[in-house]
Amino acid sequence: MSRLRRAGAAALGALLLVVASPTASAADAPTPRVSLSSSSDLDPAGQPVTVTGAAFDPKFGDGKGYGVRVGPRRTGWRGTDKTPFTQFSKLLKENWVPGITLKPDGTWQATIKPAANYTAGDGEAISAAKEQIYLMIFPWDNPDTSRDIVIPLTFKGITTPAPVDGALAWGFKGAWRSYITGGGTITPSQGATYDTSGQAPYPYFWPFKTASYDPRTGRGEVQLTGKVNFSYEAHTIWDYGLANPKVVINPDGKGVLYATVNYALFGTKTQPKDVFGPQQIPFADLEFDGKPAVSGKKVTVKIKSAVLTEEGGATLAAGGYKKGTPLDTGTLAFTADIPSACEANGVYTKGNLLWGFKRSFRNYVGGGKGNSITASGGAVITDIDVQANPNGVATGLHQYPFRSAQFTSETKFDTSFGGTITFSYPAHDDFTVQIGNPRVVVDGKAGSLFADVELTANAGGQGKPTKQTGVELAKLNFESAKTSSADGVLTVSGVAATLASDDAFAGYYSKGEKLDDATVTLGAECSSLPAAASQSGGSGGGASGSQEDLVPALNFRPPLANTGSAPFGLVATGVLLVLSGAWLVHFGRRVRRS
């Protein structure tokens, strides 16, 4: 098989259109075959083409004969009824003078004159520029399609169109086609045709059959038809066939191409040594060029890359094509009943609020030894906007789970969320700050964020613990917010927030203090919410971020642990003012006075 491995060096020879039976067989039964004096670059106005047949059993099918037609391969092309869309239609039968005479030895000859444009029997104008023209031969009045012969005819200056309902434009592998045409034959049949928009030796169109695709999940499956047989008898490749591809589309932009494969290799033509199939196998692993484009019921996606699977490579191992061998790229086009896009219609049943209160405060608490930031009640701490700290405290933004929503429009709604985030700083009188059950109210460009807020500290502190339910914690500004609405999901991001209540923090944060931006996401029952970042339900650490450190380093903070019980006012000032420009000055003055 050394000659088989010289695929890349094989010269591109004239394509010999010798049609064998669809599958190789070890039996000696006659195999109908035909040859054409020419089948490509035909004169569009029509030119004589000699068709020669051999091994057509005159007695097959009770001697009813064979139909021979030229025209598009439409529904009813092999029927016994009149086919007005054909430009040539005759019966091939033993001693059949009115049509084409089949000799007792199974041979016959006829001359056809296919044209690229003609007027059909019912007055329809048919053009090769709109649909493929074929020479079609089939057992007459017989459902057996195993002996069907379908040969595409191409015309000079006219590009073969893809099937109307869609097709897989894919040629398997250009080097393989070049190798086979160097001394063998390639035979498309059962609907597969040459894609003459490419370069010779041409790749193929595999006609679309059925499909399912859901753009909401990104999953789909497309069944195609057609068969292409490769033969190189001088190299003992009696037959290698690919048929009925099936493409599976996965949400990750990848997929698998299945194909029904058969082969008969080595030995002799009547007694090949290696025989396989026909059997469907996962033939190629695919990577698509982005998401499939949907327009009504029509779907199109390009195959960015294709490589042989282990199973596919095993059928070609004798030719040196192993698992991972690159194959041709291509395009898949099909039609499908696309599920209706998810519509909320003002009813939202899921969602979340992404908000971290104040980034500097999160980092300040995270920087203290023995401190923690924890989530409960369904709230989680994400890995968004994280700054690493030596204490392993999770300092990312907080995500609060959906509870309910009253929706009027994208600029007027009221939605509630659950869960609680707890900040704990034991070194400062064992104080804790809890923010829970936030509620977002939107009215035009303005809004409010309400929440339950609680501050506690050890007994003996001078400050008074605070507990407020449903307090207006932040004013919201939607002037610069971005709103997106698609597939039943409404997202409002970049919502500016400023502190609205002094009382919520015992007066130690001033009204108007800038807080973190918020993102509100609402989803209809039928929707799929965007994937959340990795989350932590407790006090785990986070990845290092590139944000600037807005809190003074630990070695610049006064050693409160050595001063005994600090007054609550000092605790609140040190913990809750955090970044205020007056914080460090105030802090220093209190220490010097003590």
Image: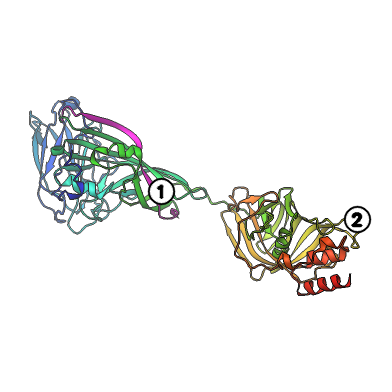
Q: Quadrant of residue 357?
A: bottom right
- Mark 1 or mark 2, earlier in chain: 1
- Looking at the image, residue 333 sits to the left or right of residue 76; the answer is right
Where residue 534 sits: x, y (%)?
61, 51
Q: For mark 1, give the secondary structure.
A: strand
Between 138 and 238, the one lying in front of the other is: 238
Q: Quadrant of residue 575?
A: bottom right
The color scheme shown is rainbow
Where residue 537 sits: x, y (%)?
69, 49
Residue 483's place in the image compared with 23, above or below, is below
Q: Amino acid at mark 1?
A: Thr
Residue 280 on the magenta span: yes
Q: Residue at x 34, y 37 (%)?
A: 311
Q: Amino acid at mark 2?
A: Ala
Residue 388's place in the image compared with 120, above or below, is below
Between 280 and 222, the one lying in front of the other is: 280
Where residue 278 sits: x, y (%)?
29, 32
Read off the residue under disc 1.
335
- Looking at the image, residue 27 sits to the left or right of residue 216; the answer is left
Magenta: main secondary structure: strand
Query: Magenta stretch?
Result: 269-295
The mark lying in front, picked from 1 and 2, is 2
Read off the residue under disc 2.
459
Circle 1 packing at 10 Å, graded few (<14), some (14-19), many (20+), is many
Q: Which image quarter is the C terminus in?
A: bottom right
Q: For mark 2, give the secondary structure.
A: loop
**Residue 40 has which mark?**
none
- Regarding residue 192, the answer to whether it shows in the image is yes
Between 172 and 307, the one lying in front of the other is: 307
Label 1 close to label 2 by CB (< 8 Å):
no
Circle 2 packing at 10 Å, graded few (<14), some (14-19), many (20+), is few
